[in-house]
Image (tube, coloured by chain):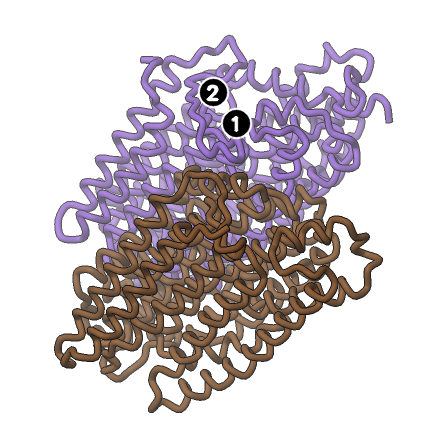
Amino acid sequence: MLDLPILSFLIWLPVIGGIGVLIVGDRFGAKQFALGIALLTFLFSLPLYGSFDRSTAAMQFVEFLPWVETFRINYHLGVDGISMPLILLNTFITVLVVIAGWEVIKYRVSQYMAAFLVMEGLVNGVFASLDAMLFYIFFEAMLIPLFLIIGVWGGSRRVYASFKFFLYTFFGSVFLLISLIYLYQLGGSFAVADLQKLPIERMPQILIFLSFLLAFGVKVPMWPVHTWLPDAHVEAPTGGSVILAAITLKVGGYAFLRFALPIVPDAAAQLDWLVLLMSLTAVVYIGFVALVQQDMKKLVAYSSIAHMGFVTLGFFLVYSIAEFAQGNTGANMSAAIMAVQGGMVQMVSHGFISGAMFLCIGVLYDRMHTREINAYGGVVNRMPVFAAFYVLFAMANTGLPGTSGFVGEFLVILASFSTNNVWIAMLAATTLIVGAAYTLWLVKRVIFGDIKNSAVAELQDINQREFIMLALLAGAVLLLGIWPQPLTDVMEVSIENLLVQALQSKVCIGAPVGGCL
Amino acid sequence: MVNIAIATPEIFLLSTICLILLIDLVLKDTDRMVTYLLSQVALLATALLVFSSMGSEKITGLNDMYVRDDLGGVLKVSILLLTAGVFVYARKYLRDKKLWRGEFFLLALFAVLGMMVMASANNLLVVYLGLELLALSMYALVAFNRDDGRSTEAAMKYFVLGAVASGLLLYGFSMLYGLSGKLDIAGVAAYISAQNVMQNLPLLFALVFVVAGISFKFGAVPFHMWVPDVYQGAPTAVTLFLGSVPKVAALAMLLRVLAESLGVANPAWAQMLLVFGLLSVFLGNIVAIAQFNLKRMLAYSTIAHMGFILLGSLSGSTEGYSAALFYTITYAMMAAGGFAILILLGKEGVEAETLDDIKGLNERSPWYAFIMMLLLFSMAGIPPTVGFYAKLSIIQAVMQAGYLWPAIIMVVMSVIGAFYYLRAIKMMYFDKPDNAEPITAEADFNILLGVNGVLMLVLGLFPGTLMGICSAAMVASQL
């Protein structure tokens, strides 16, 4: 089993399958073909979990081929406990997206399906790359299918949204390119493992860190470079919103762990206050912004930004924790691990929940063709099954214990008490109130109350297709909420190893970060 | 030492051109296809001759006027193959527009001969000779549709400005001759290496004129004025030729003159290239946004791309030169493909040249739209297309030479440039077509266009081979 190039398979099967769907065209069976490819990819991703060795932080399922020898770029793939769950999330969500577009998409179906399949392959490539330039290529190439998805199948302001999305993320990532070339000239290699060991002076570290922050912060997206997300979400078709929220945002968070923390630890330690500030602003301020939205998709988009704020908060808490615990590092390593773990669980959980929320909105939109909250009310009377799902996902979004939303937020808040700044924990915890406010108010206005709109009175409850996709997500949300151990187990050793690197100074070798300022 | 064998490909091409010229005289208008086929055979046979002579040591001959090396070989093979492709694309255009005459192919062949001479020149005067043969053929080609006012006007502008630029270049050469008493590349190089370049005012003066002449051929700012007008005014088939192949020749001139003979003076001319290159990247990308005419938009985009090539060359290192060569070859392919799409969309008597003409292309033909999208993303430099590697290798060379800020300006300008490429893609994919007429082309056109588009992706996935060829050519020529 270990000899098969599973990762290559997970990248190229959907890409080539997507091209196949394009060639088959709209005439016959594009949808069935696409679903087959997506299911097959999902099945092939399961062995990643099944034969994953939990006891080592080393990369697994490694593949290595020299690729562009002039620049010593290698086709180097592998996963550890941090990237593996995200690949599974991606293959799982893509299946749902294909199902979600089944009856809804009438225009250029084969191109639609092909775009999502190609996207799936590229995102798997991002998560599996162990070569920085390979990572960058997948990271950039991802923009192309998503640009087309928003632009071709999007809403009325789709041109604006797709351009904003593309140019924003492209602008962020060109600085990443400059940084990677700089690192290459410093160390003569693009391999992530080599870059993580490379000693770098303080000043270059800070500049590199800022470029990472720009590139990945736009992707996450962090306040104040988040403005492309609400536009992209509102205009994208349902499937596009799901992929955006559930998958592409995770790329940014993942990249912080893979690049920013281990490659430039001193700069990260020195500037962690900036990231914490941005994250807390996202959590608190964006939460209030979500409260006043009139458009359901926009509301969920802002709630995504707030939830992703938790992810970056968790990742960058480790420096405050380490600083607070100076002298007895051993004792507080567990708090740091908890913070990163919380961020990771939050990413996976947000993938399920935001995906589910957007699918729910899609279900309503397909029937009513409006996303205005005011147009709804009393949906429960006509769609009881749907309403049950909707309320469940809304509860998960607020972080109710027993759902996956609780685990991540709880771990991050718990970890934030191990810092010397109690305000971080206080502010982070306000999300439990604000998040509950905007989500529950949304539920109240859309699902409950009296039927005020005659169109709502004619709604049909969800059909079998919609039931299947929502039920799958509901299962995932509950499973992760009640029993998160299968997820936290696989990442534990990798996160520990990551933290060893992230807390080790590169300016004065041997000392902890910030140890010899 | 006379070693006439090293010029075999050029001699062969020249004799074939004369032969075709005679044959074309006796052909009836309906048999013009013969001229076309003969031209193609001439190009491919010459390419084969060049190819078979590659891989050997650098040899000079014809009294040291001429050189045969791998760098020249790579340049010449690219020129010949690109021209063969251009002819396939041009055939459809010339037929559609009732310009189906033998002179197009003959003039283009003469231009090719000029470019080959430039690629193999070992003497500043030979460089100039090749340049003039190229330029004179191009002037005539731009005016090819003589009944069209814009075409004639473009030719006039091109001629006047081109003549001034040739004058500048020649003046620079004459000053170099006056200083060193030499015209051959090795002799000038030997003279330069004994000088303290930055203190030698007459030498710097000569350099300014040489660099200006070369920049004009690239169409770099501030010598870019002719580019948009000529691109727009010339018949699209000529724009296609002008916008792709001569760029390789311009790079050949840069490598022979600046790198080989004036290489030691790099610190002096690098500053000029830095300024010209950055201005080109800046102005080209910004002004292209304001263009609604696709030919003008591509003209400004060319200016920006030429800025990248100049910036790549300024590092004076093997990496920089091979990055510039890689960029030029791949750019010529992108430009050829882009203009070919314009030819494809044109109809009898109507030129397709505005953004409106590509509206809804995805509805009319998903395949052509896909190819155009690949070409545009490649021009924008988005992976996994080859344009990304072209930009990557240039930026890496620029940073290697210690120019961090220029590299940052370049990437930021690429983001701004991405906007107008995206706008064209938006027109093709997001908008509905104005007319739903099917698009037709002959098989050879279709196949070549398909190969051209897919090559952007294939070279993007496997850029190693072409990059290897480029750097091997530089190493073999000791650049």
Mark 2: secondary structure: helix
Q: Are marks 1 and 2 in contact (CB under 8 Å)?
A: yes
Task: Provide the chain ID for the residue under circle 2.
Answer: A
Residue at position x 32%, y 18% from top? A4
What color is chain A drawn in? purple
Whether residue A139 is visible to the viewer of this picture, yes or no, is no
Going by the picture, which residue comes out furthest to the front? B1
Which mark is on residue A487? 2
Mark 1: secondary structure: helix
Q: Quadrant of residue A455?
A: bottom left
Distance from Cα at disc 1 to Cα at disc 2:
8 Å
- Tag 1: Cα neighbours inside 10 Å, few (<14), some, or many (≥20)? many
Residue to which mark 1 is pinned: A345
Looking at the image, residue A315 lies above or below residue B31? above
How many numbered badges does the structure rendering display?
2
Q: Quadrant of residue B178?
A: bottom right
Say which label, 1 or 2, has the lower sequence index.
1
**What's the residue type where badge 2 is placed?**
Leu
Looking at the image, residue A318 lies above or below residue B225? above
Q: Quadrant of residue A473?
A: top left
Residue at position x 17%, y 60% from top? B443
